[in-house]
Amino acid sequence: MAKRPTMHDVAAAAEVSQAVVSLVLSGNSAGRASESTAQRVRDAAAELGYRTNLQAKTLKTGVAEIIGMVGDQVATSPFSGQLIKGAQDRAWRDGNALMTIDTGGDERLRKAAYEVLLSHQVRGMLVTLDYHREIEVPEEALEVRAVCLNGRDLSGRVPSVVPDEEQGGYDATRVLLEAGHTRIGMINIYPTATLPAARDRLRGYERALTEAGIDPDPALVLPGHGIQADGEHGTRALLALEEPPTAIFCGNDRTALGAYQELQNRGLRVPEDMSIVGFDDHDVLQDFFHPPLTTLGLPYLAMGELAAALILDPSAPPEVHAVPCPVIRRGSVAAPKGS
């Protein structure tokens, strides 16, 4: 087996001291070595195939260049791969790796995951949720710098990064108002106000109507569970009203798919007979929408990047950071029929 090159080998090849090599390869050479010297060190390290001994560096500093991420079904969720990518990309830009452990909702595995990450002396911990909800960050995570990702820390001890659900509900409703609709139904994704996505998207819907001078009509708001059948049943109920809506804001894309199906069953067309806006921009579903669905995207990539940046900034206060949900305009919105 070939001998691994050492810092001494790099110093000899670059004709500098080991101290200069250490400064350059740790990124701390500014003002202490010229750029030409620093580049000579980097070239020598690359040519020799030198790798920094992270274990030795961790023993010296007490902190590894690793950010830990613990999540329940995060690695397997069709949405949250972007959370991982965003955090990983941001960590990597500062020379850190991301170590992810998916617990699958198993409490024993969750506790073990924190122990494993703490034993690696990680720089910080991303407590990551598979869907937006409110929690108290586990005590184990608080032994290092922690950030709650895709969830709100009820204790207020750490920064939280969440999608801006209320502004998203507002923007979705504004899309329909700007198209000329004044009677807009909503099929929500949860029957109570305990889930932030359901509660805040509804608040945004009501705020947009109120600002437009329209009194929210409780008869136009129906509960659901975020599944296709809710879109079918909800659309059926809205069409049965004495004065049906001309547009529907669906709390998520699965609900919107059900709305499309019910309208098609009745010989009605989107958007000519009914405009539809969804939420989530679920990639797996988009091929089933004809015409393509106007929806709001979940900003998971940006959320992951921000959460990792907050880990790397220990001075950042324990605030809630609500990341905007972009409007993705497609073909499901038009002016009301006959307008």
Image (tube, grey):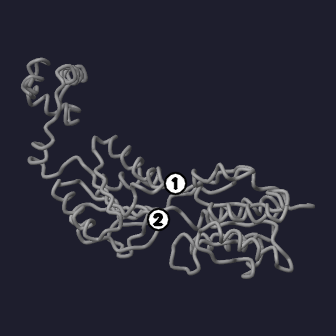
Question: Which is more N-terminal, label 2 or label 1?
Answer: 2
Distance from the alpha carbon under mark 1 to that under mark 2: 12 Å
Task: Find residue 57 and report its horizontal and vertical position in percent.
Answer: 12, 43
Looking at the image, residue 174 lies above or below residue 38: below
Can you tell which quarter of the image residue 281 is in? bottom right
Under mark 1, the amino acid is: Pro
Under mark 2, the amino acid is: Tyr
Task: Find residue 71 and report its horizontal and vertical position in percent.
Answer: 35, 61
Rendered residue at 21%/57% (across/down): 117
Looking at the image, residue 35 lies above or below residue 159: above
- Left or right side of 209 for 44: left
Of residues 237 and 119, the one drawn nearer to the viewer in this rendering: 237
Disc 2 packing (10 Å; few <14; some 14–19; many ≥20): some
Of the two numbered discs 1 and 2 in the rendering, the one whose residue sits closer to the viewer: 2
Q: Secondary structure at mark 1?
A: loop
- Left or right side of 270 for 126: left
| Quadrant showing the C terminus | bottom right
Rendered residue at 71%/62% (across/down): 174
Looking at the image, residue 104 lies above or below residue 240: above
Can you tell which quarter of the image residue 235 is in? bottom right
Rendered residue at 32%/42% (across/down): 92
Can you tell which quarter of the image residue 56 is in? top left
To which residue does mark 2 refer? 131
Rendered residue at 35%/55% (across/down): 310
Q: Secondary structure at mark 2?
A: strand
Q: Which mark is residue 8?
A: none
| Quadrant showing the N terminus | top left
